[in-house]
Image (cartoon, grey):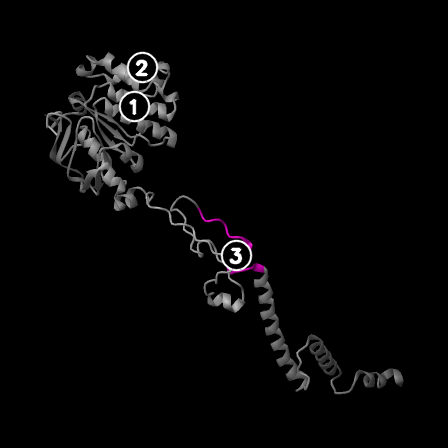
Amino acid sequence: MSEQQGLQVNGVSVAYGKHQALDNVSISVAPGEIVVILGANGAGKSSLLGTISGLVHRNAGSVTVNGQATAGFKAHQVVAAGLALVPEGRGIFGDLTVEENLTLGAYSKFAREREDTQRQLVYQLFPKLIERRQQIARTMSGGEQQMVAIGRAMMSAPGILMLDEPSLGLSPLLASEVFKTLKKVRETGLGILLVEQNAKQSLSIADRGYLLENGRITAEDSAQKLLSDPAVREAYLGGAGSKESPRTHHPASVTQPARSATEQTVGTAAAVSPLAAGHIRPAGLDKRPPLASEQLAGGNIQEWIRNAEVIQRSAWQTGVRAHRSDVAGPSDNTSGSLADMLARMERAARTSATGSGSSPDSTSSTNGLGE
């Protein structure tokens, strides 16, 4: 790219106190080209746009707009050199009308000479703004306000248009319309430098892209190669490009996995949950369904309770047998049936009440009533 056209950023470094926000960053944007900067939050993307537009002081490096070095330029002088910024959050004048916002975009002398031509271009790109010319900007929808912000930036007749998160806060439908509009803007010959969290859609309309990590450019390639790069897809696209693994069907006849020690003690038939059965869910697109009651504790809850009762009853009968042996002595009848247990306990209680081995009948015969 000729240094007389487009944007050239060479070796730019920026620090906020001891924090190094940008470290030797170099990028370029040619006329009629869309370039995307990809990076995580805090990587330095907004700092880079602020530095290029003259809002942030750089410690080292150079910025050239259409062959003109911007060292020492203030923000309005950078705009006059042919570079416009649409900031994050749009930054429109909410209490002014659409027409007034557009007029303020043509502030510089160079832009005022081309105001009518640029206004017609904006209305051609955003026909909806024609009918909304006298509407107060803050009463418009988010997508319409983004149109006003882009239109106002274009009123300065720039050669390079920079946008910081243009789809922020917009519905997927409105965001898609914004990206379609940027493709139309590119056809007018403007170079576009785009910072956008929606990496998939931004790369789909871009020509090239840069990866910015911790203030450093770590990669540069065509948009299509970055879009198909597995590392980029994993880091910025959430793995959305990888084919979804087929769901595994487990018929009832398939042998279930070995049960845990707890399940073996209780004696339940383990019910396999969708995750345990190997079902693959797309990351971040759904949530786990709540477990049904029969899946709690790894099996059917009724069987779980029934087996617990059996274990408890067995332990209780064992204790009763030991107590019976101590009270009534050894017995040949050790069947353990409930009737036998109750009979023996009743006899032991009667013996304890009389204080002797005599029967209740003999006790009543020797009662004082016979005297």
Q: Secondary structure at mark 3?
A: helix
The residue at 60%/69% (across/down) is 310
Residue 87, quarter of picture? top left
Three-letter residue code for mark 2: Glu
Three-letter residue code for mark 1: Ala
What range is drawn magenta here?
Answer: 287-301
From the image, which quarter does the N terminus lie in?
top left
| Residue hosting label 3 | 295
| Residue hosting label 2 | 99
The residue nearer to you, when weighing 216 against 6, is: 6
Q: Find residue 149 and name its label.
A: 1
Residue extending farthest to the right is 371
Q: Is residue 274 left or right of residue 151?
A: right
Residue 114, quarter of picture? top left
Q: Is residue 227 left or right of residue 325?
A: left
Residue 295: say if magenta.
yes
Q: Is residue 101 visible?
A: no
Image location (x, y in percent) of residue 328: 68, 84
Q: Is residue 61 left or right of residue 225?
A: left
Q: Nearer the viewer, mark 2 or mark 3?
A: 3
